[in-house]
Image (tube, rainbow, N blue to C red):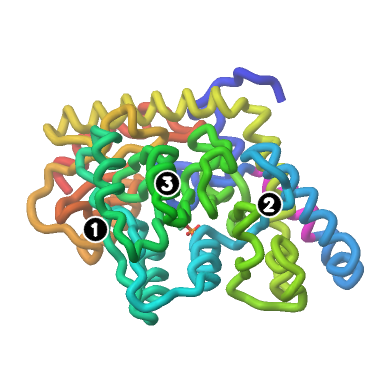
């Protein structure tokens, strides 16, 4: 595949996305190109031709080769990477592996993803661990102030910080390296929720200095659904287990994650095909296109609506969250039906989200998008 290929509607044929839908929500569930789905189908066909031989002889080595490919893209050694179904599963594995003590505290950002907040409520809450919010100001403009606020929150009982690399609601790229530095300097372990980061921002995971990093490949790396990765610092691997304990229990990381019972591993095995697709396009060219499009379209919408964007340009990448002109108090029970109406009545896929009690719309930009996809939102956003 040649580099410097044009982006926009011309790339839509790479994907099975339904014609007539403006897909401005790569952030939620990604979109998988035909070429990756074909690679996944080929793995499935190989498995079904001889299931026993596949699981016994082919899978262990093939998975490790796929993990090596992930390491070449995201940094470090393949032995420090394992696959998980999704970011939520990886976060749960870390939270379930920690030995908590009543009175411990966990710091999580105020924009923590809801599923992660629920996982914290379950794992930390049931043993009397307090979750302390680190407020992410909206709009987010000052990275230093957030790092200082984080340092001030750390107390003698702070055990863990759960940091989104890119927040879901605000589409905000947090100053991750500086935050990790502040927590690690105080002896606090750091779990990074990197659900949106691989493929959306340049990344060398081990260099960040966190204890654990979980990221989705099925969002911004074009992988098939159910393909996420977990990285654990070598000194944190002995205590880490998947939430499903199976035959390899006791064999350590990553073996315990490589086999968690009979399941379809084709999305994981097709991860190299997804990374090949991204690398053939040129990850920097993809990021440059996506970031510029998201920035221009967010400015266009915020100007037209007379509102604001949840993060300054320096703290955004390929997503942007713009406040809607709509009045009234927003919560998930109100915003979800609005998102569904956008799809059903207007053929536009972009989530309406509550943030600090108000209504916001998040847009994503991907190689198959172009300005015309977003322009109808000007009038629709005013009327919603
Ligand atoms: C910040 C954040 N964390 C976690 C997740 C969960 O990802 P998954 O559904 O792959 O578990 C998401 C999904 O959008 C997210 O935005």
- Identified at 39% across, 24% down, the residue is 292
Residue 247 part of the magenta segment: no
Given this view, does label 2 or label 1 mark the residue nearer the observer?
2
Would you name the residue on which mark 2 appears? 80
- Identified at 55% across, 25% down, the residue is 284
Q: Dot 1: within a 10 Å radius of its alpha carbon, few (fewer than 14), some, or many (20 or more) residues?
A: some
Task: Answer above or below: position of 217 versus 11.
Answer: below
Tell me, for residue 335, which label it has, or none: 1
Query: Does the beta carbon at disc 1 come under 8 Å from ligand 1?
Result: no
Asked whether 229 or 50 is in front, the reply is 229
- Identified at 46% across, 56% down, the residue is 189
**Place of residue 118 in the rendered image (x, y in percent of width and height, measured from the top left):** 37, 70
Name which of mark 2 and mark 3 comes first in the sequence. 2
Which type of secondary structure does the marked residue at label 1 adopt? helix
Name which of mark 2 and mark 1 comes first in the sequence. 2
Tell me, for residue 185, which label it has, or none: 3
Residue 22 visible somewhere in the drawing: no
Which type of secondary structure does the marked residue at label 2 adopt? helix
CA gap, disc 2 and disc 3: 23 Å
Task: Answer above or below: position of 171 versus 329.
Answer: above
Asked whether, in this view, residue 232 is left or right of residue 342, the answer is: right
**Place of residue 247 in the rendered image (x, y in percent of width and height, measured from the top left):** 76, 78
Asked whether 369 or 20 is in front, the reply is 369
Give the residues drawn in magenta, as a range.
34-44
């Amino acid at each position: 595949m040649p580099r410097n290929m044009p982006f926009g509607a011309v790339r839509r044929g790479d994907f099975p996305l339904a014609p007539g839908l403006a897909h401005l929500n790569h952030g939620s569930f990604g979109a998988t190109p035909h070429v990756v789905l074909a690679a996944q189908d080929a793995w499935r066909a190989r498995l079904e031709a001889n299931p026993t031989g596949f699981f016994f002889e082919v899978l262990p080595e093939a998975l490790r080769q796929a993990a090596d490919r992930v390491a070449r893209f995201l940094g470090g050694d393949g032995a420090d990477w394992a696959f998980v179904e999704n970011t939520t599963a990886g976060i749960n594995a870390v939270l379930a592996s920690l030995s908590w003590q009543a009175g411990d505290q966990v710091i999580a950002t105020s924009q923590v993803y809801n599923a992660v907040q629920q996982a914290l409520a379950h794992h930390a809450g049931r043993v009397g661990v307090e979750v302390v919010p680190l407020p992410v100001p909206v709009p987010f403009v000052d990275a230093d102030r957030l790092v200082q606020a984080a340092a001030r929150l750390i107390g003698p009982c702070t055990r863990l910080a759960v940091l989104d690399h890119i927040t879901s609601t605000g589409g905000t790229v947090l100053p991750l390296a500086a935050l990790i530095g502040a927590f690690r300097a105080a002896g606090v372990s750091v779990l990074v929720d990197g659900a949106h980061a691989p493929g959306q921002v340049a990344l060398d995971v081990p260099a960040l200095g966190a204890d654990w990093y979980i990221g989705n490949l099925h969002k911004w790396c074009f992988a098939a659904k159910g393909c996420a990765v977990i990285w654990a610092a070598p000194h944190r691997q002995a205590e880490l287990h998947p939430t499903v304990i199976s035959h390899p229990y006791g064999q350590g990381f990553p073996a315990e994650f490589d086999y968690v019972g009979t399941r379809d591993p084709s999305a994981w095995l097709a991860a190299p095909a997804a990374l090949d697709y991204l690398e053939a396009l040129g990850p920097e060219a993809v990021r440059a296109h996506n970031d510029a499009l998201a920035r221009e379209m967010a400015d266009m919408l915020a100007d037209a609506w007379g509102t604001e964007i949840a993060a300054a340009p320096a703290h955004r990448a390929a997503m942007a969250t713009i406040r809607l002109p709509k009045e009234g108090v927003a919560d998930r029970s109100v915003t979800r039906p609005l998102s569904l109406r956008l799809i059903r009545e207007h053929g536009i896929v972009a989530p309406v989200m509550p943030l600090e009690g108000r209504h916001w719309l998040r847009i994503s930009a991907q190689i198959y998008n172009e300005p015309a996809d977003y322009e109808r939102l000007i009038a629709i956003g005013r009327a919603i």
